[in-house]
Amino acid sequence: MAEAVRRPRAAPWLLWLALAAAAAALSLDEILARLGPGATGIDHALLAYSMLPRSAVALLAGAALGLSGALLQQALDNPLAEPSTLGVFAGAQLALGIAAVLAPELGPFGREGAAFAGGAGATALVLALGWRRKLDPVTVVLCGMVAAMVASSLTAALILARGEYLFALLIWGGGSLTQEGWRASLAIAAALAFGGVAAFALSRPLATLATGEATARSLGAPAPAIRIAALGVGVLLATTVAAEVGLIAFVGLAAPTLARLAGARAPRHVLAAAPATGAVLLWLTDGIVQHVGSGETVPTGAATAFLGAPLLLWLLPRLYLADRPAATASPRRRDPRVVLAALALLAILAVAASLLVGKDASGWRIATGREFAELLPFRAPRAAAAAAAGAMLAAAGVILQRMTGNPLAGPEVLGVGAGAGVGLAIVTLSVGAAPLSLQMAGAALGAFAALAVMLAIAGGGRLGPERMLLAGAGISALCLAALNAVVATGSRGAFAMLAWITGATDAVGPAQAVAASVAAVILVAPIILLLRWLEALPLGAPTARSLGMNLAASRIALTALAASLTGAAALIAGPLSFVGLVAPHAVRAAGLARLGPHVLGAVLAGAALMTTADLLARTVIFPYQLPLGLFASLIGGAYLIGALGRR
């Protein structure tokens, strides 16, 4: 397996002992308080049925996730593989939501079976998509990221549609370790015992597989069977934890990586050290959560993302993975006037369909005459807002793709949209019912901060284009963890934040539509004045300086503009739409290689895509409505998966 980090000079086992001691001290402090001279029967009951089971679950779940991550990484020869990056958790959550709606009588065992089916299905989909590129580590993780985003959108839509039944699933998704008995501990312990035995049996075959698939075949080892067995055990461990306590992200990534940092190299050593490392990590994190947040303010699962996402960002420049070029062939060149005319016609047709087409009790119908006049005040604002959001996201995508030299960059996959959400959440929690201008300012500042972190990480050419997308995945995970911590509180604002995450236009009125349209015009228009910068930056810093550009000033200005576009659009479309990636990439592939036509074509395509998504959201399950971001993410996710498969 490719080494993720360089061998340290000294194994830091003393540090791990210190961390374990700190975790024990945090837990024992509260336990001893319940056993003091003044302890009552209630204290003893809390100790026996809440505190001790919580510590046991933290240790067992951390060990199970550490072993799961080690198995997944060795099965795929991928140091970035873990249940979160492969979409296992998102698939499990979606399956649990579906099972809760369609078969609530299944009970606990059915819940674990549904979680395993969802996680295994997501893993199978990711592997099928990455098979064409021989399970290249970066491709597999990118496909997992897209699959997780699409599954998360579907889950959020399901929760919004059946909130009276599934709001607990929303809180559960935060990954709380609060316990009321020993059932979860016993279930995870049983899965961990089985996983430990299976890992011991698989340690030698995995060591053979680590020498290379060709070598393994020459030794008579059935490489596909070994991979499938290890993946199955890893998914079982992760989904059992998910079914019992919720989503605990990044422990499966951090534990094997830190085990290697501590000196474990052979597969059997990593399989032995990763569970212990994961147990210490989760136990310590949960102890900190209980002391800092009084046990409930921030779910432990969300807190682990604050540990794992920075670890992923720190690892990216150090990974021994061969980056592939951002593009292997020049896009086709066609007459830009023909392509732009086709895109303009497509946008006009999309807006017309959004205004005219609908559903009623008798089925599909086209509104005309008096009916059209009556429906126009309801349909026109949301169509205008959707078109404006799509245009702004597409314009931001052009800026980011040109700035980074990465044709698969976009505000959604680089974490900029999620950063806008954090800014919006801060404004909402601080001010409450904030005016639209303040919401837009908060979202823009959050997007600017996320994009600034991204460019700082990628500065100096330390990251290749595809690794930049992985850095975006880490930033997205960090920002979405903060949002999940807000959502998992179950407050009134949590449900509103969930609706924003999925994107919604059903409540857009004329004032919001006008504001979105004006913002689109004001923010998109300056790109015309910045074409020279966007043409020079992809040529490299020396060439840009030779043309008289001030690199720092130009990058700050473009970053601020892209962040403002994303922040304004995210108020309507949410952070998961993928339109900011799809529209610029698709029109460039269609032949609009020159920057001016590229910008105009992307704006038209983005408006058409988002308006079409809004039409589908309004009509597919009439009289109910689905989130706008759901359909946009389905379209964009499918396109991104296809693009990764072709390249």
Image (tube, rainbow, N blue to C red):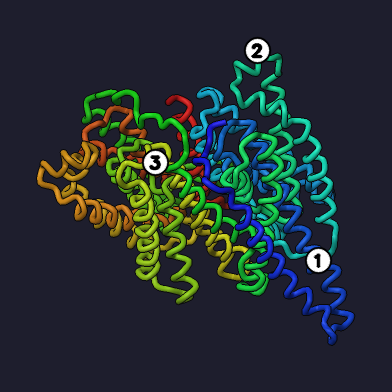
Vertical position of residue 474 compared to residue 325: above or below? below
> Label 3's element?
helix
Alpha carbon distance from label 1 to label 2: 50 Å
Q: Say which quarter of the image contains residue 237.
A: top right
Which residue is label 3 attached to?
581
Viewer-nearest residue: 488 or 372: 488
Viewer-nearest residue: 150 or 603: 150
Alpha carbon distance from label 3 to label 2: 43 Å
Q: Nearer the viewer, mark 1 or mark 3?
A: 1
**In the rendered structure, which disc, 1 or 2, sits on the residue that comes first in sequence?**
1
Viewer-nearest residue: 257 or 106: 257
Query: What label does residue 218 carry, if any?
Result: 2
Q: Is residue 544 left or right of residue 428?
A: left
Q: Nearer the viewer, mark 3 or mark 2?
A: 2
Position in image of residue 98 (x %, y %): 71, 46
Q: Are marks 1 and 3 in contact (CB under 8 Å)?
A: no
> Label 2's element?
helix
Q: Is residue 191 left or right of residue 492?
A: right
Q: Say which quarter of the image contains residue 130.
A: top right
- Amino acid type of the residue tagged 1 in the rendering: Leu
Q: Is residue 284 left or right of residue 182?
A: left
At label 2, counting other C-alpha atoms closer than 10 Å, the crowd grade (few under 14, some 14-19, many 20 or more) is few
- Residue occupying the point 62% across, 63% down: 488
- Amino acid type of the residue tagged 2 in the rendering: Ser
- Amino acid type of the residue tagged 3 in the rendering: Leu
Vertical position of residue 491 compared to residue 223: above or below? below
